[in-house]
Amino acid sequence: MTSARPGRITDPERIRALAHPLRLELLDYLGDVPEATATECAERTGESVASCSFHLRMLEKYGFIERAEPRGREKPWRVVSNRIDARPDPDVPGSLTAVRELASVNVAREAERINRFLARADEEPPEWVRAVTITRSSFWATAEEMAQLSRDLQEIAHERFGGRSADASLRPQGARFARLFAAVYPEAEEQR
């Protein structure tokens, strides 16, 4: 397994294993619950048990999930880590293409989620609508500054809200599951 630093995935095969909408949905679900069987995953995703089983095995093969302790005849799965940092590495052939594929799937999924929320925002309580932000910023930065900004965004979410998925007692009353989607990237030179 190729990795430039702990937690960072640069291996194209592992990154490509994530570039599937159902696998990402399964990881999301398993990140929200302590463990789940293929049947529970199928109920959550609306996919067949066979399809979920196949994709769960693929996620296991690439080290993203593992078997939990059996519950009688049931064989549940759990995530290995809720933090996945897949970034291209110029020294790893194919990693840029793999990250591009994964990013494309992620951007489409997040855009769909945002649009679904906005389509029903008039049904939400005003305090939740006011809490939502869709923002963008433009700035001049070095590669090191951009990399630090990316790490800072991840750390803010992790430090402030970490552990709440696994331990419901850490969630304040009235808390709802929320998402942060951010992309930090330089514009192409010819665009400036």
Image (spheres, rainbow, N blue to C red):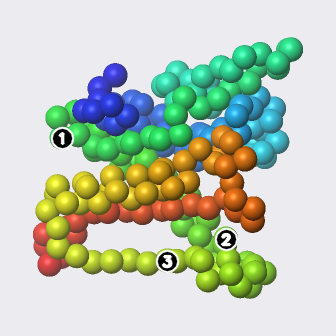
Q: Secondary structure at mark 2?
A: helix
Would you call the spot at circle 2 few (<14 residues within 10 Å), some (14-19), or many (20 or more)? few
> In 3D space, how far apart are the residues under numbered discs 3 and 1 (Cα atoms)?
31 Å
Q: Is residue 154 above or below residue 132?
A: above
Left or right for 168, reference 102? right
Q: Is residue 155 left or right of residue 140?
A: right
Residue 26 appears in the figure: no
User: Which numbered disc flags the more N-terminal residue, 2 or 3?
Assistant: 2
Q: Quadrant of residue 96?
A: top left
Q: Which mark is residue 116?
A: 2
Residue 182 placement (x, y as % from top left): 42, 63
Could you tell which of marks 3 and 1 lies nearer the N-terminus?
1
**Residue 90 — which label?**
1
User: Which secondary structure lies at badge 3?
Assistant: loop
Query: Picture coordinates of residue 81 (x, y %)?
Result: 52, 34
Q: Nearer the viewer, mark 2 or mark 3?
A: 3
Nearer the observer, 108 or 9: 9
**What whole-number distance in Å separates the C-alpha atoms at marks 2 and 3?**
14 Å
